[in-house]
Image (tube, rainbow, N blue to C red):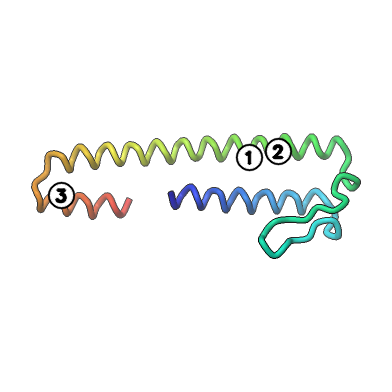
């Protein structure tokens, strides 16, 4: 869950940085809620640049999606391993196993 929120924050930062690089600084202004105001952005961009930006964002989305899949698979593997070990452990071992997996 924490990793997912971290990735969302990173993706949000990436979007803001890319929007800032696509348009003049006078066109984009940050709002108080962390969003962006893009007054006149359409007029400042040409179609080629827009298509390139869209393709670039799609590549970033694919990369982040793949990264999420890898992290979710690792998490699922850890949960499966924990359940397997905890199922066969006594109370003392169970507490130690729990500590080890909480660190992961």
Residue 60 figure quarter: top right
Residue 25 figure quarter: bottom right
Residue 68: percent from the left, percent from the top?
49, 40
Q: Residue at x 27, y 49 (%)?
A: 101
CB under 8 Å between discs 3 and 2: no
Residue 57: percent from the left, percent from the top?
68, 39
Q: CA distance from mark 1 to mark 2?
A: 6 Å
Label 1 residue SS: helix
Q: Is residue 8 left or right of residue 16?
A: left
Which of the marked residues, 3 or 1, is nearer the chain's N terminus? 1
Q: Nearer the viewer, residue 4 or 101?
A: 4
Q: Is residue 76 left or right of residue 65?
A: left
70 shown above or below 96? above
CB under 8 Å between discs 1 and 2: yes
Which of the marked residues, 3 or 2, is nearer the chain's N terminus? 2
Crowding at dot 3, Cα within 10 Å, few <14 / some 14-19 / many 20+, comes out as some
Q: Residue at x 54, y 37 (%)?
A: 65
Crowding at dot 1, Cα within 10 Å, few <14 / some 14-19 / many 20+, comes out as some
Q: Which mark is residue 94?
A: 3
69 shown above or below 15? above
Q: Which mark is residue 92?
A: none
Look at mark 1 in the image and give the residue it sits on. 60
Q: CA distance from mark 3 to mark 2?
A: 47 Å
Q: Residue at x 20, y 37 (%)?
A: 84
Label 2 residue SS: helix
Look at mark 2 in the image and give the residue it sits on. 56
Front position among marks 3 and 2: 3
């Amino acid at each position: 869950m924490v990793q997912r929120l971290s990735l969302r924050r990173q993706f949000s930062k990436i979007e803001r940085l890319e929007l800032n690089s696509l348009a003049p600084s006078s066109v984009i202004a940050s709002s108080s809620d962390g969003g962006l105001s893009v007054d006149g952005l359409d007029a400042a961009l040409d179609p080629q640049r827009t298509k390139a930006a869209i393709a670039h964002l799609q590549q970033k989305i694919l990369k982040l999606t793949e990264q999420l899949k890898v992290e979710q698979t690792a998490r699922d593997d850890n949960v499966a391993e924990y359940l397997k070990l905890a199922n066969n452990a006594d109370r003392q071992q169970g507490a130690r196993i729990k500590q080890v997996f909480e660190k992961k």
